[in-house]
């Protein structure tokens, strides 16, 4: 009987984490930030049909970076989770916290048990009835959940973008200001992001039952300029 | 990866996969209980889209089961569904239909076409057939919406087997449907403006309630009035109840005046005395100088 090579669990986890980080770092970053009417999500995304930001439920949005096929599968699973729960109980009983927990379980399980970890990082955000109830959850490839305030950034460039947002974010930003803040933070000092390379959506408290709206085309140009 | 992906965008299949079966077959009871029924609903196509209207009464046998039931629901932004028949089964069907449309829209990133929505509802009516046959839980929805691609309102009706029929101009369903339909037929013309179409729907419901005991008329004592909604390019919009109430008040006033002989359109001058009246005619006069018949 042959003896398999011994590899320490620590080594395995480190290798997987490194692999996942590399995959995530290949894509562009994305941020969510609280503004006066709700939560704004902005991503650098040249594609108009392959979305990084989407609606999950009435007040919940999803955003993912990394490998598209993987975060899109997570998005679909999230919509299914939310729709079944809303049907089973009530629409009010669907919240970002339980969804973030479900995602964390799923992603942690994959990270520990599968050969290949997920090369994704996701955000689950919920706009509350009151601004104080807004929630931003960031979930990393290994299933770690982070509950963040005011803004949250995912992707390879997350740290420098977070630093920039820490400087520029303030309470009660208007939609235009929030969008300009996000655009500048995502781009950094030495470049600008074209308006048509931005994917933007909001969860606006004033939108009625379904708070999610995409901001694109002429509306986006009007808000940010070319 | 443990992400589970059953059945594409089919929400009912997803529910079945997690142990809910919304169309689970029911077994026939020895004596069917009194089932709550909803009654008159109608949809009328007009210049900007569709007007949908429905009364508010639910009955169980000869009893009024509920006085303020809503029978018109938005299915999604650009369509609405109205229900007649067994109330419980119908409301569950509407709930599932709304969720199915939203589920598809979220997963696929685009809404279904109006035709696609109408077909989805047909499948749900078909799934309800065992319950309809065994328990008499017949649900007959009326589906209407604004077709964004064709830029016009469209109306679909269903039979209990899931047959789907597109109506050209208007339709009414339920126990008072026949009276409502006749009223609409007499007042309908192509590309009616919104206000006249709403008025026509209100008249139709009034006449249905007048002839059919299971259809509720306006209830000024409790302040309950039939529900009217419009579906246009701008989306589904319910008329405020006070506007509906005002239209019913005006309609009833006209009816009262007509009944007491003081017609609002009566001529200002009194009719001529009988002696001055022309001789009693039994046929229409020929035009002067016209050739004899």
Image (cartoon, coloured by chain):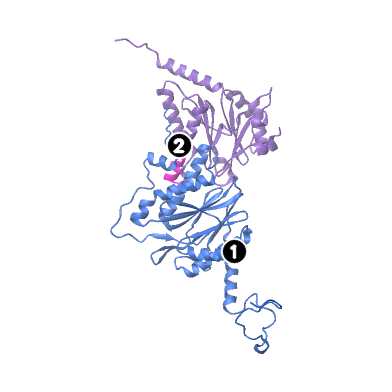
Q: Residues within 10 Å of mark 2 (few under 14, many from 20)?
A: few
How far across and down, in percent of the image, does residue A125 sit?
Answer: 54, 36
Quadrant occupied by the N terminus of chain A:
top left
In this picture, is B146 found above or below B188?
A: above
Q: Residue furthest bottom?
A: B275
Q: Secondary structure at mark 1?
A: helix
Q: Residue furthest top?
A: A2
CB contact under 8 Å: marks 2 and 1: no
Tag shown at residue B8:
2
In this picture, is B159 found above or below A28?
A: below
Q: Residue at x 59, y 63 (%)?
A: B199
Q: Chain of mark 1?
A: B
**Residue A177 lies in what quarter of the image?**
top right
What is the drawing colour of chain B? blue
In this picture, is B40 found above or below A100?
A: below
Read off the residue under disc 1. Answer: B199
Q: Chain of mark 2?
A: B
Q: Is residue A206 left or right of residue A77?
A: right
């Amino acid at each position: 009987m042959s003896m398999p090579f011994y590899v320490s669990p620590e080594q395995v986890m480190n290798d997987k984490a490194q692999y996942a980080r590399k995959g995530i770092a290949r894509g562009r970053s994305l941020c969510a930030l609280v503004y006066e009417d709700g939560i704004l999500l902005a991503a650098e995304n040249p594609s108009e049909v392959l979305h990084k930001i989407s609606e999950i439920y009435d007040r919940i949005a999803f955003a993912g970076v990394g490998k598209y096929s993987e975060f899109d599968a997570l998005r679909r699973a999230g919509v299914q989770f939310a729709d079944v729960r809303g049907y089973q109980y009530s629409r009010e009983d669907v919240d970002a916290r339980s969804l973030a927990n479900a995602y964390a379980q799923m992603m942690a399980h994959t990270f520990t048990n599968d050969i290949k970890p997920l090369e994704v990082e996701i955000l689950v955000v919920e706009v509350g009835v009151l601004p104080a109830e807004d929630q931003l959850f960031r979930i990393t490839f290994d299933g770690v959940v982070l509950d963040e305030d005011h803004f949250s950034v995912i992707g390879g460039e997350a740290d420098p973008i977070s630093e920039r947002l820490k400087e520029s974010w303030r309470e009660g930003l208007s939609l235009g200001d929030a969008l300009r803040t996000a655009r500048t933070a995502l781009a950094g000092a030495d470049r600008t992001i074209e308006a048509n390379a931005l994917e933007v959506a909001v969860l606006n408290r004033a939108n009625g039952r379904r708070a999610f709206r995409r901001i694109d085309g002429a509306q986006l140009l009007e808000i940010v300029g070319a | 990866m443990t992400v589970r992906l059953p059945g594409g965008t089919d929400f009912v299949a997803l529910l079945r996969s997690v142990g809910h079966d919304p169309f689970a077959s029911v077994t026939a009871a020895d004596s069917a209980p009194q089932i709550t029924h909803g009654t008159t609903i109608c949809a009328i196509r007009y210049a900007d889209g569709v007007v949908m209207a429905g009364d508010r009464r639910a009955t169980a046998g000869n009893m009024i089961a509920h006085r303020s039931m809503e029978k018109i629901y938005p299915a999604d932004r650009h369509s609405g569904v109205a229900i007649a028949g067994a109330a419980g089964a119908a409301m569950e069907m509407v709930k599932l239909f709304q969720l199915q449309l939203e589920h598809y829209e979220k997963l696929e990133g685009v809404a279904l076409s109006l035709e696609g929505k109408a077909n989805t509802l047909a499948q749900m009516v078909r799934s309800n057939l065992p319950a309809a046959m065994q328990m008499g839980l017949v649900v007959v929805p009326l589906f209407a919406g604004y077709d964004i691609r064709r830029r016009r309102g469209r109306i679909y009706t269903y039979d209990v087997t899931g047959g789907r029929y597109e109506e050209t101009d208007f339709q009414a369903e339920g126990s008072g449907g026949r009276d409502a339909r006749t009223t609409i037929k007499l007042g309908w013309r192509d590309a009616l403006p919104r206000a006249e179409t709403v008025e026509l729907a209100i008249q139709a419901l009034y006449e249905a309630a007048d002839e059919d005991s299971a259809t509720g008329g306006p209830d000024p004592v409790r302040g309950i009035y039939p529900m009217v909604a419009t579906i246009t390019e701008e989306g589904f919009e319910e008329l405020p109840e006070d506007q509906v109430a005002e239209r019913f008040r005006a309609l009833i006033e006209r009816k009262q005046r007509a009944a007491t002989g003081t017609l609002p359109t009566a001529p200002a001058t009194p009719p001529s005395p009988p002696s001055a009246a022309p001789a009693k005619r039994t046929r229409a006069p020929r035009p002067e100088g016209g050739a004899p018949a």
